Image: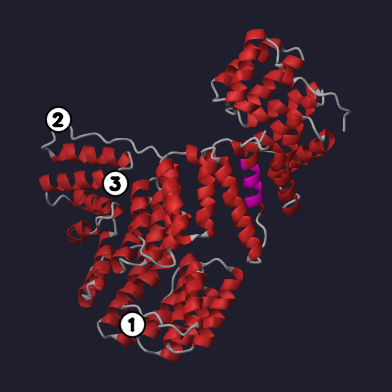
Amino acid sequence: MIKHLRVLPLFLAVFAMASCATMPDDESTAYGAFLAARHAGVNRDAQRAADYYAEALRLMPGDVVLTDRAYITAILAGEMERAVPLATASTASGDPSRLAGLYLVADQIHARRYAQALDTLHNAPDYGPFNTFLAQIWSQWALLGSGATDEALTGAENLAAPGFLSPFIPIHRAMLFEAADRIEDADGAYQAAVFASPFPRMATELYGSFLERQGRHADAIALYQAYLEGNPLDASIGMAMDRASIRGRAPRRPSVAQFAARSAFGPAASLAAQADIDLAVVYLRMLQRLDPGEASIRVMLGETLQRINLPELALLEYTAVEEGPFRTSAEIDRIWLMARLGNLDAATLSAQQLVEQTGDTEARLILADLLRVQNRCGEAAELYRGVIVDRHAAGQPDDWRHYYFRAACLYGDEDWSTAETAYLEALEVAPNEAQILNDLGYLWIDHGVNISRAFEMVSRAAELEPEQGNIIDSLGWAHYRLGQYEAAVSELERAAALDPGNATINYHLGDAYWQVGRRLEAGFQWRRTLDLEPDDTEREGLAIRLESGVPAAESVPIAVDNP
């Protein structure tokens, strides 16, 4: 069976944002608002949860729990201004979540109220290891901003962190040195950070910008080139490379708040990558408070919000990314997310507009994918072909997926001869790719040609991917077409166990049961297949089978020698 001709699971996994309850009958009570807020939170509606907690707090001012929950939900929902007084109130009541004080510090550093930030940190409760690390690096930025440069640098020199946090210290020190105009020290620290940072793109960008500001364009170009050798498609470093090559205007040195956000970006992004939890969003919102316009923070927020099932908020972050190196990738992420939410028409229109505006390869590929899953196979195949031709012209290596999806589109458009040629081209690019072996083998088996070679191909595919139900189905169907019914039943039963909801597999299994004399089970499988969304051809075949009790003539095995 050719799996990719069916709608991709990506588009079946639609986020279900259930509608939230309205206020209970006792809506004038704080408890009623609290219950509504809890219900909204369970249903992943952060905006309503924030509104209801704010209402509960209005009705019961000063409540410690409500204050902190109102702050947390406001910051999750991106209500940055609303979160500030709530964070202030929560901090005054002891900061029960240990998160309000840090957000307040981010707000104070952004507003250049460095002395206030230091007071907030001085009076803070025990934060725990991760929060303590953030508190330490932000205290050093507040010290530097307030003029206590030596104290800030001494603190950075003595800074230690547990576990995965320690690799982020070198880049923090490098930025502090640069902000303090300790240029030679900054240069050495940046060099160390480039080799040690878990986020080499960020370290490369920061060090390269520093070199450009020093007029060291040749060194910046060498740095960018070294990074691009391993990451040739990175748009941000590519743009930096272009700028340095023409000795364009160097990026402005970040402000204290922007440096503070970059110091914490690595730890926050690392936490977000390790755990899909609301807490990761809270930390990223703190960075956003420090540097509201930073595109990389918005992109990371969008990705994290998407993973924790807050897709509407993720769409807002992707949409808000400004023109620059992250804009196209953010738009592609937004389009994918719209598709996952079931808005295929809007996603397709946005993808078409992005292709017209940029001609970007990734934009063309996402448009092709969207057209493919909507059975607009001819248009999709042309887009894949265009990408293949352009990559050849640019001297870029072949990507088997482009050939593979083009072939799938041609097969889906019933252009079998051209599809066969396209699959053979894909096989030349990736001779051991299981899905290509499976699909071309299945095509031949289904059309009764090249059966011996097709059997070898689907057998090889099954060895490579023994847990893929659609591939095991192809092997079972190959046995069937060869008249090896018992073997067909064995493989098709295995395929059905791997993918029990697949219509084609159950359809084939019914035919195999019929051939070995298990007629009642055959009828059961055919009836069951009707409930599994068979395609039109399968539905017609099922009608014949259920009426006559016999497989249609076209499914009777062909007469060939066993391989």
**As drawn, is 329 to the left or to the right of 491?**
left
Q: Which quadrant holds the C terminus?
A: top right
Of residue 427 and residue 78, the one placed in the foreground of this image is 427
Q: Is residue 118 visible?
A: yes
Secondary element under disc 2, as helix, strand or loop, is loop
Front of the two marks 3 and 2? 3
Camera sees residue 307 = no
Q: Is label 1 or label 2 in front?
A: 2
Q: Residue at x 32, y 67 (%)?
A: 293
CA distance separating discs 3 and 2? 22 Å
State the image coordinates of residue 95 (x, y, percent, origin top left). 24, 58
| Mark whose residue sits in front, 1 or 3 | 3
Labelled disc at residue 152? 1
At horizontal 64% and vertical 58% (from top left) the residue drawn is 389
Residue 286 higher or lower than 22, as above or below: below
Percent x, y for residue 280?
Answer: 38, 56
Where does label 2 land, which residue? 25
Q: Closest to the observer: 225 or 73?
A: 225
3, 461: nearer the viewer? 3
- Residue type at mark 1 is Ala
Q: SS for tag 3?
A: helix
Q: Compared with residue 25, is residue 331 higher up or lower down, i.e. above or below?
A: below
Residue span colored magenta = 401-409
The residue that label 3 is drawn on is 46
Assign a secondary structure to mark 1: helix
Q: Is residue 402 magenta?
A: yes
Dominant SS type (magenta):
helix
**Residue neighbourhood size for the residue with mark 3, other residues' Cα within 10 Å, grouped as few (<14), some (14–19), many (≥20):** many
User: Is 129 on the left-hand or right-hand side of 434?
Assistant: left
Q: Earlier in the sequence, mark 1 or mark 3?
A: 3
Question: Where in the figure is residue 344, as x and y percent of width and height?
Answer: 44, 41
